Image: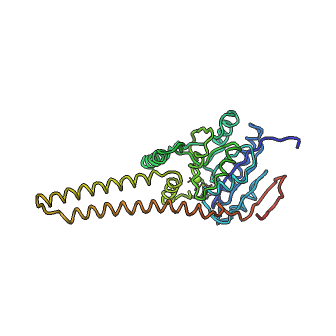
Amino acid sequence: MAESRPVLDIVAPFFNEAQSASAFAALLDKLEAAVAQRFGMEVHKILVDDGSRDDGAERFSRALSGSWEIVRLSRNFGKEVAVLAGLDQSRGDMALIMDADLQHSMDTSLKMIAELVEHPDIDVVYAQNDRREASWRRSQLARLFYSLINSSQRFDIPENAGDFRVMRGAVVRALTSLRDKRRFNKGLFAWAGFRQKAIEYSPENRVTGTSKWSRLNLIAFSLEGFTSFSVIPLRIISLSGMLAAMAGLVYGAKVFFEVMFYGIAVPGYPSLMVAVVLLGGLNLTLLGLIGEYVWVTLSESKDRPVYIVRDVLRGNVSDRPPGVSET
Ligand code: UDP
Ligand code: MG
């Protein structure tokens, strides 16, 4: 080969984003031109259709230009897994992960790429949401979540940083070597280490479609983060269980003492209720938490593949056969 320019892979998962297909393809074109002009890099686009139920993949395949592929998963696996499916296809020198819903801007992407190009000592640049739009309650909740999850680890999961990031090929290979089935990318990014740098950004408003995260989803996702990256909840519960048991013991001794030596009648109903409710609650919580960890262990031990590819659509990739190929 005469020229071998460094390659930037753009990885973008999408799920029911048909409405933003042409706009996102246009954004990618602009980004590709800017990347070529400013950094002399080639761009390869890797989109992952995370089991969309609309005709997004077809629309993307018509709208995309340059070198691209669309990995179509056999069903909806969730964004975390879709990102892995995209990274698995990445062979470039750098990879940029971004959303296909136009919330991640070209400006921030270019800024992150520039950081990586200009600073050889940095391996990852991630975009940190400045959370201008978030409510106070929500940001306090987020803060609590991160301080809890970060309280017992050798690595810190940065606040408000998601998948929107650029990394070197070595980091991509490290990440794809982590085959967790129940994935919590923020945790995996942090676990993998490397020298990371944050830049601030505020996400664009969603122009079309809706966010795929419901409140319930977010809670479930936080639990996933906890159970796959922290034993803290288990410890808190076991500790409070122990404290409650000790308090019960002391109270029991007091009652016993009073009955034996002073003949004071035991206030039966209230004390019973307190004990039952307290211990019952603790028991249930602990059981639930243990269940969470067992569930994680179970899903890991099943050793299924993390995702299944239905097929891959390709365009203009010189070293690979064009058109649809079954995998
Ligand atoms: N997404 C996905 N699979 C899902 C849910 C979402 O691939 O199961 C994609 C979605 O199409 C978008 C990105 O992940 O490109 C971010 O999703 P969303 O906008 O719902 O999340 P938010 O921006 O609200 O964090
Ligand atoms: Mg979004």
Answer with left or right where residue 116 lies relative to residue 157. right
Answer with left or right where residue 237 lies relative to residue 193. left
Question: Is 232 located above or below residue 286 in the figure?
Answer: above
Q: Position of residue 192 (x, y in %)?
A: 61, 45
Q: Position of residue 172 (x, y in %)?
A: 68, 47
Query: Does residue 134 appear in this view?
Result: no
Q: The N terminus is located in which quarter?
A: top right
Q: The C terminus is located in which quarter?
A: bottom right
Query: Does residue 194 appear in this view?
Result: yes
Q: Nearer the viewer, residue 159 or 134?
A: 159
Q: Nearer the viewer, residue 136 or 197?
A: 197
Q: Position of residue 293 (x, y in %)?
A: 50, 59
Q: Quadrant of ligand 1?
A: bottom right
Question: Is 318 located above or below residue 2 in the figure?
Answer: below
Q: Nearer the viewer, residue 311 or 130?
A: 311
Q: Residue at x 69, y 54 (%)?
A: 86
Point out the residue furthest to the front here: 260
Point out the residue furthest to the left here: 262
Q: Position of residue 60 (x, y in %)?
A: 72, 58
